[in-house]
Amino acid sequence: MRTPMIDYLHLLLGSVAEDAGEVASYIPELELADPDRLGIAVATLDGEMYAAGDADVEFTIQSISKPFTYALAIADQGLDAVLERIDVEPSGDAFNEISLDRGTGRPRNPMINAGAIAAHALVRGDDAEARAERILDLYSRLAGRRLSIAEDVFESELSTADRNMALAYMLRTVGKLRGDPADVVRGYTRQCSVSVTVRDLARMSAVLAAGGRTPEGDQVFDPAVNRQVLSVMATCGMYNSAGDWLTSVGIPAKSGVAGGLVGVLPGQVGIAVFSPRLDPHGNSTRGVRLFERMNHDLGLHLMAPAESARSVSRRLERDGAAVHEIAGDLHFTEAERVLRGFALEPVGDAPVVVDLDRVHRANDIARRMLLEGIRRLHEDGHDVRIVDPWGVLGSAETGSGELVRGEQAHGGYVPASFPDVASAARA
Amino acid sequence: MRTPMIDYLHLLLGSVAEDAGEVASYIPELELADPDRLGIAVATLDGEMYAAGDADVEFTIQSISKPFTYALAIADQGLDAVLERIDVEPSGDAFNEISLDRGTGRPRNPMINAGAIAAHALVRGDDAEARAERILDLYSRLAGRRLSIAEDVFESELSTADRNMALAYMLRTVGKLRGDPADVVRGYTRQCSVSVTVRDLARMSAVLAAGGRTPEGDQVFDPAVNRQVLSVMATCGMYNSAGDWLTSVGIPAKSGVAGGLVGVLPGQVGIAVFSPRLDPHGNSTRGVRLFERMNHDLGLHLMAPAESARSVSRRLERDGAAVHEIAGDLHFTEAERVLRGFALEPVGDAPVVVDLDRVHRANDIARRMLLEGIRRLHEDGHDVRIVDPWGVLGSAETGSGELVRGEQAHGGYVPASFPDVASAARA
Amino acid sequence: MRTPMIDYLHLLLGSVAEDAGEVASYIPELELADPDRLGIAVATLDGEMYAAGDADVEFTIQSISKPFTYALAIADQGLDAVLERIDVEPSGDAFNEISLDRGTGRPRNPMINAGAIAAHALVRGDDAEARAERILDLYSRLAGRRLSIAEDVFESELSTADRNMALAYMLRTVGKLRGDPADVVRGYTRQCSVSVTVRDLARMSAVLAAGGRTPEGDQVFDPAVNRQVLSVMATCGMYNSAGDWLTSVGIPAKSGVAGGLVGVLPGQVGIAVFSPRLDPHGNSTRGVRLFERMNHDLGLHLMAPAESARSVSRRLERDGAAVHEIAGDLHFTEAERVLRGFALEPVGDAPVVVDLDRVHRANDIARRMLLEGIRRLHEDGHDVRIVDPWGVLGSAETGSGELVRGEQAHGGYVPASFPDVASAARA
Amino acid sequence: MRTPMIDYLHLLLGSVAEDAGEVASYIPELELADPDRLGIAVATLDGEMYAAGDADVEFTIQSISKPFTYALAIADQGLDAVLERIDVEPSGDAFNEISLDRGTGRPRNPMINAGAIAAHALVRGDDAEARAERILDLYSRLAGRRLSIAEDVFESELSTADRNMALAYMLRTVGKLRGDPADVVRGYTRQCSVSVTVRDLARMSAVLAAGGRTPEGDQVFDPAVNRQVLSVMATCGMYNSAGDWLTSVGIPAKSGVAGGLVGVLPGQVGIAVFSPRLDPHGNSTRGVRLFERMNHDLGLHLMAPAESARSVSRRLERDGAAVHEIAGDLHFTEAERVLRGFALEPVGDAPVVVDLDRVHRANDIARRMLLEGIRRLHEDGHDVRIVDPWGVLGSAETGSGELVRGEQAHGGYVPASFPDVASAARA
């Protein structure tokens, strides 16, 4: 069977055939871009890639580099040190405004140039080349192939980097930049000049969608760092129109003046498009329309809740035992329903079976909630047996169908119970 | 078994025993509040309610009314008419600033007073009392019980409503308000004076979390309206600190000066807390800390992707047929994986079984993707049989285990195929 | 002889025959104005009036009332009390912006609506009518005839006073307004509706030019109050273009939306023009051009220094006495030169004549400086004789040509010497 | 006689013995300044200098250089070219803010750093050294002695000029700066490092007070340029407090971070003080107090009109002729009164004597008005005779006491009549 995914992408591209806006002109080299290029790529968290159009055309990453370098800065310096220098508030200003907070001097967020320059400067490395090299290594790791810098664009941008020079000097004035401003701008300009395709960007975005992990299982960013980056993309990624973007498209995104645009739907996909003509905000005109369209067609919106769960668990009686048959993926919400079922068991020594045969995924909190429920059933006197053929509760020693005592389960599975008294005391 | 949910809530409340900040003083009646009150309630989408502390103490809803009235305004006037009068961009300003856009005159968003007053004025109704009555009806429907207005607070607020009077007159000046400003402020003040408990607010929030539907299945808000409201809450709900809130807590929220604070995790839960002392932003001090804590403990964050899905589908050979065994909830991402499996089937007339026995939920796009895959398998010549005991594909006539022709399936199940050519042409 | 003054005014009016801009439309009654009206009047400090064009057409004073009411507010409450409520800083904002200082809540200055409303509210009077009556009395006293309120314009403006209502409520919110906002706006609107001609306005302006004194010698404003008003007019009187106005025209001025425009050259003249069409700043289009033209033709600019003084004093020897012949008006600068001449007298008992026959005017500081010089000459042993036929040194008992001892002069003339030790200690 | 001027200055300094504030610390070299230094100098337009305290201590001119270089930029490029790059509006921002107009990109005015750097760049000269040399020549010419650059301060400032570097790069970005930003900052820093005493600054200010002319008669600045500079100093010279300064002190002024402060009273004096401790606005704390004190003591305020003129002219009958005896300095206002007297002469051939024996000064417009009056008297048939012993009417050939025909007078004296038809037509 030919997958309809590719057909859909072609349809999508066809729906934005007409175009408007101008190619970025403030960097001479960018003006040379073919304004009619149009490409799209969608990457899944496990490494599948769908692409259509000019998916193999290289262009410079430009501002799309910002979230990734921000993540690296946090990894290198810690979140607190980064927050001390760069705020995370949306800015009403255009992408090239100063936007330093009057009180603290911090750039408003890492998605505007001032904040992105400050973030670049926080990347470890002795000079522009060293920092740019570490950044290139990171991007390559995310993209799954060795990337390189478009030296001609780099030279062109560096020679017209007045505004970034101004920002870098201003940052040093307010104590938010160490090092030589000219060197920092040089490094930042190299970062912006990394050459990518939509395939690369889709894969890089998919890593963010996967909580910082590549399809190959390489945990590039700590989940907390990854969440920080996505949160900032959600409110600050699309320049002037944070609210407009979140209401109409509804996913964390970032655009670049070369015409790239990426979007991340956490837990689902990374998407990248490329079309060089820009709207007055500096976002790819067709890129924005493609995202609006996909949002409409595919229901990819942070605020679009999944259909409300129906029968997560049901209680049967089988061979004198109460059987709790649980189905579907388990997070806090689903685990709460399971506990609700457990709570109906009267105190006593009747056997209880927790059947997880139809459960394939559970996150940490759901696991802890289930285990706590199992522990309490056991405390109530029940003989609790667990069926967990998919290993959802996380321990290798619990085989499929094996009956175990809740206490054992508790001991064997989790260091932390729910509710977590230790955690409560520590807060 | 005693559910650990309640124990957890007690632990939570205990973790914020110490308090700081001041009770709102600009409205005389609010100063009378007992500053030590502390309550919490968590409502699930299917109507379960967990509560602890002062969960039955009544207080006035104040600004927490804003998202709900905004939704009503959209329902009454249509989104376009509302957007023409009220923008959706986060505002750096404090909650009582003017914040009218210099160009358009629109309030920056419906979560600041100017925007909330404009939204109130868009609710249908001849005068303050009529609008307030319709609003009270709505809130009661959301809360699942008949609410009432705290007349003493209403009188007190109305007598000190200078700033709101100023805003209403200013709005009329710029053409963003029809009707008598004093009447609009009167109605808006009644709206803010609705008396609620955290149980009420949690349930109201759970309706937003459920895409606009009550646990009883009453679709109060259109899903698109609901998504609009949540998006605006995500960026504009917490006054000065949109970015800070989204990075640290990560869920759409709204606070009120009486000490209430609600949060919505789409598809999962509605949460409400109550503690009257406010921080300098005007948000409940302990309320904010409770949300930070829950975010940490329960992983309730928009940007925290579920663990990446493992084996959604597997291909078996059984009785000469290729069997695609599918498991777990299906959205775009999971459906894409199923299609990937289908795509491996070579063209031919070998029978193919699509086994949905382990699938309990699928959203519309996933349904359409599966059906399109089934249609294509059929076009390739396969004899496709569908096992759908849970009715995931949406049609009653497809019984569990019944073998059907893909064509039939296609004809019987869905009006729209994927990719959706009609939709593409229309865009 | 026919004075060329009138001819000049006719020439001036002819030079701005062409016009552009629109009549103010936000007040229905103002739209009725004949847009082609054009009048001018120039009033001297001693009561002469030159006028041309539509000099007897009545129109409403509108914002030109602001400086006069500001003066009355200071007279009624004291400068400190007024400064506590209204700042004196130029505002970059348009005339109808809020412009309350974020820190103090004060309106930026009394020439924008917010500040003018606050100033109106500071005028003594129990209600709108009482305040408006006192204000009308003041304006009448300044204009030299009984003025009245254009009731039709008043009613029209009051019915469209939303913005002013907004400002008044906002002022009360920040504690900068006592009393009922609606009553204050009513009174302020009456103030703006006073009916005047350019003759009236020219005379009112001439009082400001004369340090607060009418041609008849009625000291309406204290000189310090008058100076305060002029300073504020200089920086804040012409809406958006404080710097532009001061560089190109260079005199304190105030415009009104009905088409009036007044200018004050301290110590010289008051000027008023009337032409209803307004530029985008809300200033009379032809009015502005007339002022630019007069500035060019007549050298009326605060920063255009008089030609530098030549021989203020000369020393002659006559009949064995040193005669200091002094000529011209005396202020600090000229008095300094006189003292310079005195300083050349060697210590001794040679007679010294101070001949003021050619001096017609001296201000207080110059008088004190001369008297101190005379006292010192006397202390040095000289026999000082004073010729003061014009009474410049201020005492009736010193007749023309009479020879007096310096000591007598000192005793008789001035309570305060120069340098003023008492004043220095007090500071 | 010992002049009381010096005594007064000593009293003044004594009155500000106590001090507060901090020495500027952002430039290392400035921190070395002795914070207790206190000096004052007052320079008259004809070259007299009064000084007290640390009047010979050298310090760097810093921002006090701004008005003088602005004048040079206008002289070099023309006013229009300068206005295209630098606006003249007061800025609410602190001295080191960006303050570029969002629309035009122009710095708000030439007294903030951004505008001063743009002005420096407009001075002719191939590089930093060339521009600085021309500037040093100008300042030396104004100060009346050869000045030099404090190389140690220059080096210190240049090494900490991050903010100015930022501003220069930003200016180039918006097209308001040609040339290399680093070179411009270097030249600007040299300009700020010129070493001066209060005597130098007082004399430089006196040139501005004299309409651009040195006491020796060297017309350094065109009067229109000079007026432009003074106007800008009046509204923009004192950083945050334009309105406050103009109301309380009332003269154009400029401060520098090294502790200098100059004031200019047009037509009267130039004043300079020096005291290194600064208030939060960056103005010399004691310097500001000294100016407030002088304003109070000496009546030096732009808005303090001279006492209103009394008998400027009187009409006598002598030997059958009408004699108009005119006295005092003549500007527009006084000339108007003279014309008023002329206008009383009935048409006829009676002789009229215009006696200017008691007139010592007249500006151009007054001269033209008198001559036009004389011409009209002649046209009416009068035999007009002019007594002008001081040459006030401006022509050498008219000797004292000589009787001339009005026609001759007109022909001989002035190219332009009043009213000036040619000028009116041109406008």
Image: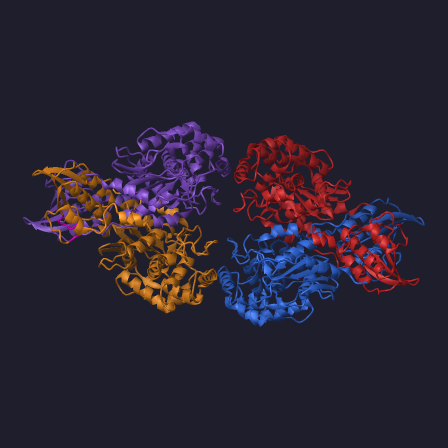
Chain colours: A blue, B red, C purple, D orange
Q: Does residue B357 show up?
A: no
**Is D144 positioned to the left or the right of C26 in the image?**
left
Residue A397, quarter of picture: bottom right
Q: Residue at 32% of width from left, 31% of height from top?
A: C141
Front-lying residue, D36 or D300: D300
Please provide percent x and percent y for residue A358: 85, 55
Q: What stretch is highlighted in magenta?
A: D388-395
- Main SS, magenta region, reads loop
Residue D35, quarter of picture: bottom left
Q: Does residue D298 show up?
A: yes
Tell whether position A177 is magenta: no
Front-lying residue, C389 or A17: A17
Please provide percent x and percent y for residue C77: 39, 34
Q: Residue at 90% of width from left, 54% of height from top?
A: B403
**Is D73 positioned to the left or the right of B196 in the image?**
left
| Farthest-out residue, right | A319
Please provide percent x and percent y for residue A15: 68, 56
Q: Is residue C373 above or below residue B134?
A: below
Q: In this view, does C205 lie above or below A159?
A: above
Please provide percent x and percent y for residue A44: 73, 61
Q: Image quadrant for the N terminus of chain C?
A: top left
Q: Image quadrant for the C terminus of chain C?
A: top left
| Farthest-out residue, left | C319
Q: Residue at 86% of width from left, 45% of height from top?
A: A345
**Is C26 positioned to the left or the right of A251 in the image?**
left
